[in-house]
Amino acid sequence: MKRIYNVLVKNQSGVLCKVSGLFWRRCFNIDSLAVGETEDNAISNMTIVSTGDDHTQEQIEKQLNKKIDVIKVKTFDEKEAVCRELMLIKVKYTRDNRRDIIDNCAVMNATIIDMGNNMMTIQICDTPERCQIFLDSINHIKIVEITRSGTVALTKCREGIK
Amino acid sequence: MNGADAIVKCLEMENTEFVFGYPGVAICPFYNSILNSNIKTVLVRHEQHAGHAASGYARLTGKVGVVAVTSGPGATNVITGIATAYADSIPLVVITGQVDSRLMGSDVFQEADISGACESFVKYSYIVRNAEDIPHIVKEAFYIAGTGRKGPVLIDFPIDIQNQKVNKFEYPDSVSMASYKPTVKGNIKQIDKVVRELRKAKRPLICTGGGAHLSGAANVIRAFAEKHRIPVVSTMMGLGTMPSEHPMFFGMVGNNGQAYGNRAMNQADMILMAGARVADRSIARPDEISTNKILVHIDVDPAEIGKNAGPTIPLVGDLKNVFTELDKEDIRPATQEWLDCLAGYRKEAEEAKKAKADLVITPGTVDPTHFIHALSDAMDKNAVYVADVGQNQLWSCANCIIRDGRFFTTGGMGCMGYSVPAAMGAKLAEPDRQVVAVCGDGAFQMCMMELGTMRQYHVPVKIAVIRNNVLGLVRQYQHFTYKDRFSVIDLSGSPELESIAAAYGMKFLHLNDEEKMEETIKAFLENDESVLLQCDVDPNEVA
């Protein structure tokens, strides 16, 4: 079962290592991890997506809370949150498939942000599920490089909306 | 004042009595500053034992034990001491020297990333980057180590910061950390639930773990059990919560425990698991423990509750606080029948043990269970018994009589070589108390260099080495699991212990005859002097 953890941590060196080390040591799974500063530059927000049964999910929350650099842990389902992922994909294009790629981008709200003679970089910022759909839609094209930010998420503004 | 002076000043503010350690260049400014202080230093013979000695000291005093070692190999050697303290929840502050902060990360001589290496064995770690931060770092370190679920805290201290000038030294009065506020008081609603269930219980049982000692709750739990007539069992780390001969104490539980203790656990309809991890050695099937009973799990560490067993009633809090609150209620469940039943089980087991006592003992050896029983029986009422790891530990747990004294062992980490340094730390803490270390010949050879420390600092610990010239517990395992296909358990190259004792100027005694047990133990315990007692046992003895 997928679960998202919003973890507020002290913004100092070594904290990322301590948190990721905890997942490694306790054999917890990390599907994705994204870190950035919050409005207070002394505090960072980590969004961790993990898959595990109820017992594992409870332990992840408790073990995170036990870490002294962890200020607060909030945990929720994908349905209770707005989730986004940023993906950059560098692809090889030809005269023949160029139009096809542009069409795909238009359908999925992806944008072409860089272009060379035979390569272009596409940006898509969407839910992790739609990012994957887009990726599948261009699987016939030669992908050169790909980078994903990992999921970032915030709980929905209106409680109880799923 | 420089950084090293500042850290010594902080230790004084924390009423540090002893620093156990081993110097090297990277910690020399600290050891230079400590010369100006009344804090006593103890030069151990291996950094690992600095951790164990500080552990013995911390366990007996309830204070935070302090260790200071150098960078690189000094720091990596202390890791086992730190990991042992972490597994047993012992409060330590470990200061490691570090190379110049401007050179950190460049693999210079004796550099080790000790805070990285120790991350999963410490409660918290600091790298001091600025000498002005020292007062608040040390204050926090002691606070974190000694509160909540106790444990070791590491302070990595680069040599240039030790030498850096400190312009202003102000030691904070208190600590306030947004991210660390242990729950000490038990939730009133949860306590009410426990009281309601306890009143209805027919076969209630308290199972105490190491937390009972760490929170200083042993007396409170004992008084609670007596007043409300609830029987008590202990895990290995909880031994000593109740005197061994107390009519309401039913032994140690687990795969190395007493059968009647385990029967009590199985048949209870309600268990108060108090400061115990519900770990594999205590509870064979933790996931099944609450199937036919109400399991109340009381622990100061919320992460322990539900980790190995799902409790019916979770209760986060410090045991002393929780049992003081519980004791205010009129509970007194009707337990006479249950107590009689458990007393019957115990009697059965004792009779079976007596029957075994008549068995033939191999000539030239003694029965280790007889020895431990007789030794602990003859010890002072308030003595400290430190068991090492291996068969000696299991024989000790099952046969040691604890009255008003303490029983130390490393039940969490199971680190061989713990007994002698830990006993040394305990004896330094309370020189007037009798302290006895019991170890096997394997564990003894992992820590026998500390005889030098004992001699140098006049620490008269009594050491009993149960000798069978093999790694007994591994041999026993290979006997049962691999049908006597013994592998790498032979210790036949071991030294003559008499010569070792002579080399360190210690009195030596040799026991290999049951007839002479009483007089040998008497000679072992008389006078407050270091004695090395070799007790020969048959390698075929199983624990």
Image (spheres, rainbow, N blue to C red):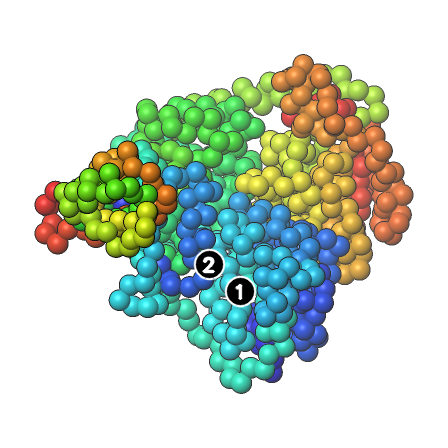
Q: Which mark lies nearer to you, 2 or 1?
A: 2
- Residue B469 in the image: x percent, y percent? 79, 30
Q: Point out which mark residue A14 bears.
A: 2
Q: Secondary structure at mark 1?
A: strand
Type of the residue with mark 1: Ile
**Residue B262 placement, left or right of A74:** right
Kindly identify the residue that appears in the image at 78 percent across and 49 percent down.
B449
In the figure, residue B36 lies in which quadrant? bottom right
Chain letter of the residue carrying label 1:
B
Kindly identify the residue that appears in the image at 52 percent across and 74 percent down.
B130
Type of the residue with mark 2: Gly
Chain letter of the residue carrying label 2:
A
Up/down of B470 relative to A16, above or below: above
- Residue B220 in the image: x percent, y percent? 43, 49
According to the picture, the residue beneath numbered tag 1 turns out to be B127
Q: Secondary structure at mark 2?
A: loop
The reply to whether label 2 and label 1 mark residues of one chain is no
**CB atoms of marks 2 and 1 within 8 Å:** yes
Q: Quadrant of the N terminus of chain B?
A: bottom right
**Residue B72 placement, left or right of A67:** right
